[in-house]
């Protein structure tokens, strides 16, 4: 609520309404004790309110606050200070955890009590109608301001929740980026080691072990290709590219080919080599299916 003037304009609360309420002040004072006792009895029937006013001192303070608020309804002056006092009441309701629907119910109870007061005091029907309309306006404005505190509290929680969520997401993204950076550095280091292994295998060829040197060099070259693919994929990932599962399937296939080459050099039994060959065949099928799925995405029917 920006200002009381704006609120009065929205509810079409005029100076005549303020005068009507001021006229009701003497009557309200006469009914104050009975209305206050009746209202406090009504509150004690609400479980949440019972917890708040469990102690006698709290009940006394609450009754004093209610009496003061009830008098301000008929004071005739409704300015920004009055608006601030209503906001403080709403904030107190939020602070003690009183559900908003009890605030609405309590205001409805007060409304009916004042209507009975007007009906019992004034005989003229038109006069009663004017007084009731003015009372309805001031009570509606009171209710609007008080319940706005609940909306403000909800917005504050949502804002804090979204800020925290955004912060956590940003922190996680930066942490993941850092891990990817470490992975790139690690892959680069391993790639340098593979280059050294490839050079060592080439040297074996010149040392006379041609067959073993060629097969070992071929295996090292496959590993080097695998490292290049992984590095390329990670660099693309750091630049915001998408995850490519084909690269990892291809890496497994390369590792399996190298294992078959090494198995040949070790002269493993036929059963082991057959198992490796079947595994390579299965991986090839998986690679084919994944590649086909990526190239032929589902399209919406026209």
Image (cartoon, rainbow, N blue to C red):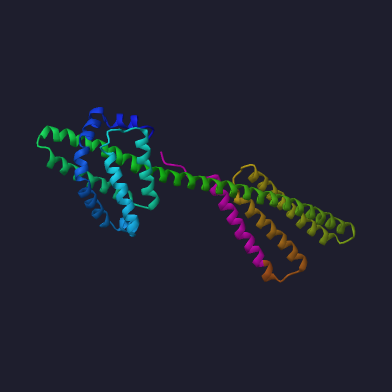
Q: Position of residue 277 (x, y in %)?
A: 66, 63
- Determine the residue positioned at 64% across, 51% down: 247
Q: What's the magenta region?
A: 274-302
Is 188 drawn above or below residue 138 in the view shown? below
Q: Position of residue 84 (x, y in %)?
A: 38, 38
Task: Give the prevailing secondary structure in the magenta stretch.
Answer: helix
Q: How many marks?
A: 0
Relative to 138, say whether 96 is above or below: below
Residue at image point 89% right, 60% down: 208
Picture quadrant of residue 29: top left
Q: Nearer the viewer, residue 300 or 167?
A: 167
Among the 4 quarters of the image, the one containing residue 7: top left
Any part of residue 150 in sight: no
- Foreground: 50 or 221? 50
- For the residue pair 233 and 123, the one nearer the viewer reads as 123
Q: Is residue 67 visible?
A: yes
Magenta stretch: includes residue 288: yes
Q: Residue at x 38, y 43 (%)?
A: 88
> From this viewpoint, which residue is outermost toward the right?
207
Q: Is residue 117 left or right of residue 287?
A: left
Report the quarter where the C terminus lies. top left
Q: Is residue 55 magenta?
A: no
**Dividing the image into 4 quarters, which one contains the N terminus?**
top left
Please provide percent x and percent y for residue 51: 34, 59
Horizontally, residue 187 falls left or right of residue 116, namely right
């Amino acid at each position: 609520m920006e200002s009381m003037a704006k609120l009065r304009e929205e509810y079409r609360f005029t100076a005549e309404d303020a005068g009507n309420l001021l006229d009701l002040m003497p009557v309200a004072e006469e009914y104050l004790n009975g209305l206050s006792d009746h209202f406090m009895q009504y509150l004690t029937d609400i479980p949440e309110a019972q917890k708040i006013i469990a102690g006698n001192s709290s009940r006394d303070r609450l009754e004093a606050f209610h009496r003061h608020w009830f008098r301000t309804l008929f004071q005739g002056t409704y300015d920004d200070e009055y608006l601030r006092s209503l906001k403080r009441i709403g904030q107190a309701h939020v602070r003690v955890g009183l559900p908003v629907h009890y605030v609405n119910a309590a205001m409805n109870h007060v409304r009916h009590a004042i209507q009975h007061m007007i009906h019992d005091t004034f005989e003229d029907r038109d006069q009663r109608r004017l007084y009731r309309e003015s009372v309805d306006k001031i009570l509606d404005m009171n209710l609007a301001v008080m319940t706005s505190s609940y909306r403000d509290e909800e917005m504050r929680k949502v804002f804090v929740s979204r800020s925290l969520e955004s912060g956590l997401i940003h922190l996680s993204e930066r942490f993941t980026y850092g891990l990817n950076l470490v992975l790139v550095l690690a892959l680069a280091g391993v790639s340098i080691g593979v280059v050294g292994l490839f050079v060592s295998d080439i040297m074996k060829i010149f040392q006379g072990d041609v067959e073993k040197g060629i097969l070992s060099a071929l295996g090292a070259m496959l590993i080097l290709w695998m490292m290049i693919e992984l590095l390329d994929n990670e660099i693309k990932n750091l630049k915001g590219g998408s995850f490519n599962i084909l690269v990892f399937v291809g890496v497994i296939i390369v590792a399996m080919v190298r294992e078959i080459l090494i198995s040949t050099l070790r002269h493993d039994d036929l059963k082991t080599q057959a198992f490796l060959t079947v595994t390579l065949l299965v991986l090839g099928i998986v690679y084919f299916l994944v590649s086909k799925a990526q190239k032929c995405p589902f399209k919406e029917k026209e």
